Amino acid sequence: MIPRIYIPGDSGALALGAEKVAKAVRAELAERGIEAKIVRNGSRGAYFLEPMVEVATANGRVAYGPVKPSDVKSLFDCGFLTGGHHKRWLGAPDKIPFLARQTRLTFARCGVTDPLSLDHYKAHGGLKGLQNAVAMTPAEVVKQVTESGLRGRGGAGFPTGIKWKTVLDTSADRKYIVCNADEGDSGTFADRMIMEGDPFVLIEGMAIAGIATGATKGFIYIRSEYPHAVAVMQKAVEIARKAGVLGVNVLGSANSFDMEVRVGAGAYVCGEETALLDSLEGKRGQVRAKPPLPAHKGLFGKPTVINNVISLASVPVIMDKGAAFYKDFGMGRSRGTIPIQIAGNVKYPGLYEAAFGMTLGEIVDDIGGGTATGRPVKAVQVGGPLGAYFPRALFDTPFDYEAFAAKDGLIGHAGIVVFDDSADMLKQARFAMEFCAIESCGKCTPCRIGSTRGVEVLDRLSQNVEPEKQIALVTDLCNTMKFGSLCALGGFTPYPVMSALNHFPDDFRPTPVAEAAE
């Protein structure tokens, strides 16, 4: 049997040297005259172990990592093709503690299968959900998704089934499914991992959405900063179309659904669904006033479902295992699993999929291992650049939409960025305002002008110019932005600013120079 060597080809692993490792492995195979198949799989998400090389042996897969090109010769000397021991030996991948403790539903195949092998996808349970969907009525599919409790994983947490039902119930000659893959939040990479590591699950989810709502065309809007994801998704769509997964007769049924990949131009605001629609239509990405909702009048004025990558990628397992199976995971109104992305100053960065309900402290201290620097954790920002900064005093907060909202925070796209005690929270607050000023589409005054004035106020505060006056001014400004902005860019910018101000007040009252000298 020809040995199979798995070397991740996803962006995260490539950034850590996976291509150099693959080149070294090929050279070593050639030099030793060994015939082997190298599979460029996705990453399993334990980025502190990447590049993680796996070998299929008679006793299952054996992992080694993090592998450097200089390790390759000694790996072969130790008999790694048969699972031999080496200083980089990790054993069975699913027994590695970081991976073993997860509940992988959406990411079950990520890092396991060949991303562009439809046969491999099917061998690991793929297309079962779509097969079930084509045998059901659209209303039955919508009911199953609704009963599962699935909510939008892009940040808003809106029930997916309700959105689908609205589009199903709206009559039109054409309907669309739009996948929002404009993953622009700091510390997030779940969408990218799915698109590069298991693209067919997203295609399957979109096809199910099309069947459920009567939509016949889909678009995946991917940010331009993800060239590898764009390339993989384009190839996967072609493969799916040739195999009859997409097209006039989906899986041989009477349902028609096709899709294409569109690439954004780098605007953060196009992560907002209506700005994304404008961009898809060839216009400058600007936020639209609501109503009308996209579900009634969306892309090209037609009823449109807009869902995040993870929302759509979660649908196949629901349609395969059933609503009750999925709903059994989680807490409160937050059902199923959530792919938590742990980043920043943290010892064990990576993607951790688990049921809702773990506390923030468990995620940061237990799973993330605390800071990479070894210094105390000062703050954790959850939900991207517009998420609130939580101090250790709030680490008992369970990972749940409502629990975070009750503490003036938001889960967003479930990205977690860790900061140690050297972080200056005044500078972090200023960054949030500056980010909003740069990325604003300019359509509404609170966002466009408020963020610019916010930077100026925080600059005066950093110079210790009438600090109490500046704090009162920035608080009032945040209140105006929160309730007056047209979309979440301006509306959520107050979260990082006010949470930093409320939880770390000492950072906002610089010590006067004269006192510091004494």
Image: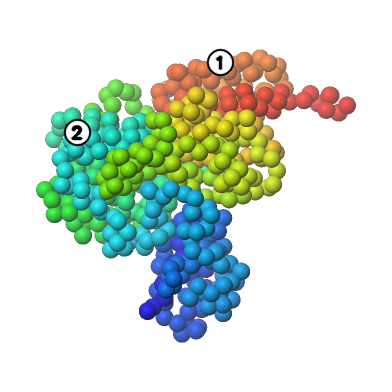
Front-most of 446 and 356?
A: 356
1 and 2 marks in contact (CB < 8 Å)? no
Query: Percent position (x, y) of residue 473?
Result: 60, 16
Give the left or right position of residue 231, taking residue 19 as reference.
Answer: left
Of pointers 1 and 2, the one earlier in the residue sequence: 2
Q: Give the residue at mark 2.
A: 168
Q: From the viewer's perspective, is residue 125 above or below residue 149?
A: below
Secondary structure category for the residue under label 1: helix
Q: Name which residue lies at 29% across and 47% down.
A: 321
Mark-to-mark CA distance, 1 and 2: 42 Å
Q: Which amino acid, mark 1?
A: Asp
Badge 1 crowding class, 10 Å Cα cut-off, few under 14, some 14 to 19, many 20 or more, is few
The image quarter containing residue 206 is top left
Q: Name which residue lies at 52% across and 68% down.
A: 21
The image quarter containing residue 236 is bottom left
- Give the colour scheme of this rendering: rainbow
Query: Percent position (x, y) of residue 460?
Result: 67, 23
Label drawn at residue 476 = 1
Q: Residue furthest bottom?
A: 33
